[in-house]
Image (spheres, rainbow, N blue to C red):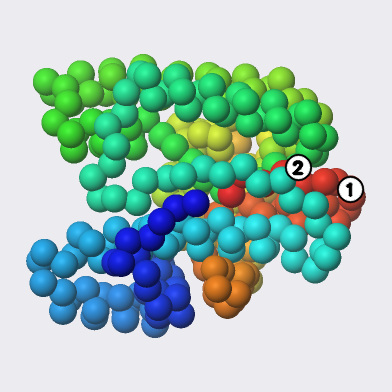
Amino acid sequence: MIKLSEAQKVDVSQTLQLYKGLIDLQANIESEQAESLKKMMSGLKPDEVKSFIENLNFFGNYAHGTHVAGIAVLNNPAANLLVARITFGYKLMPELPTIEKAKNNAKETIETINYFKSTGVRIVNMSFGGSPQGIETALEKHGVGADSEERKNMAREIFDIGKLAFYNAIKDAEDILFITSAGNSDEDSEFYEDIPSSFNLPNILTVGAVDQTGEETGFSSFGENVDVHANGFDVESYVPGGDRLKMSGTSMSSPNVVQFGWKNMGYQSGFKC
């Protein structure tokens, strides 16, 4: 159980609106919540900004997973969920990436997918991603590496450990369909080398985002490896506390495809949200 600090004990309803404003800003979406967040942040003192953003990120880690799972099991009272938890960092200063941590994470990834296989999971949702650029940025923030070229090489070595393990684990789980979000960077996900959306395997489906009119959203990543598109704009689902909130992102379009999968195939679903 994670013990909350006093700063993390927040008013859920108010924080939900602020969090939506944050993700809308990150996706360049104009919304009432985004405007409210900008107005609130403009009134913060310089020493208050860091803790404010970190608390929103912390809350968002929980809101995101709940929201994604709610989309995937919509109108399915007999849903059978197997949840695998990923704890993402929420602080503005990320953890220092290392070879040792990459090897431990690779081991955990393999063990998780093997567990899915052993329990008969048939569909896995993956509304997340990672890239070499993210590791390189973290190294730079910690002042590691003599120059950008050295950091690039270090990031590549660290990234490839996780990438290879993840790729092979999915490849070896041929009876499971892995459905993943394409990403929200408006980039070619294969060129950007985002994982797992850049993987080209017969048992992985990469999902981009469209709005209610069927047009691709401005934030959705794209490329030849993006197999299908689904609604990823203002998708309503549950969040912590039992409220419902509209969120946007390919994280929302991916479980929409999962929902279609279990409705049409009757599969037990495993979620890595």
The alpha-carbon separation of the residues under discs 2 and 1 comes to 10 Å
Check disc 2: other Cα within 10 Å, few if <14, some if 14-19, many if 20+: many
Label 2 with label 1: CB-CB less than 8 Å: yes
Instruction: Specify the amino acid type for callout 2.
Output: Ile
Q: Residue at x 89, y 48 (%)?
A: 265
Drawn side of residue 208 relative to residue 266, left or right: left
Instruction: Specify the amino acid type for callout 1.
Output: Met
Q: Residue 123 has which mark?
A: 2
Drawn side of residue 152 relative to residue 244, left or right: left
Drawn side of residue 117 relative to residue 50, left or right: right
> Which is more toward the observer, 122 or 14?
14
- The location of residue 247, given as percent across then percent down, is 52, 68
Q: Residue 250 has which mark?
A: none
Drawn side of residue 197 relative to residue 104, left or right: right
Question: In terms of sequence position, does the residue under pointer 2 or pointer 1 come before the other?
Answer: 2
Under tag 1, what secondary structure?
Answer: helix
Q: Residue at x 81, y 57 (%)?
A: 79
Residue 35 showing in the rendered view: yes
The residue that mark 1 highlights is 265
Q: How many marks?
A: 2
Residue 260 showing in the rendered view: no
Q: Residue at x 54, y 22 (%)?
A: 107
Under tag 2, what secondary structure?
Answer: strand
Occupied quadrant, residue 169:
top right
- The location of residue 21, given as percent across then percent down, is 38, 72
State whether residue 153 is above or below residue 105.
above
Q: Residue at x 16, y 74 (%)?
A: 44
- The location of residue 116, given as percent across then percent down, is 72, 34
Check disc 1: other Cα within 10 Å, few if <14, some if 14-19, many if 20+: few
- The location of residue 232, given as percent across then percent down, is 58, 62
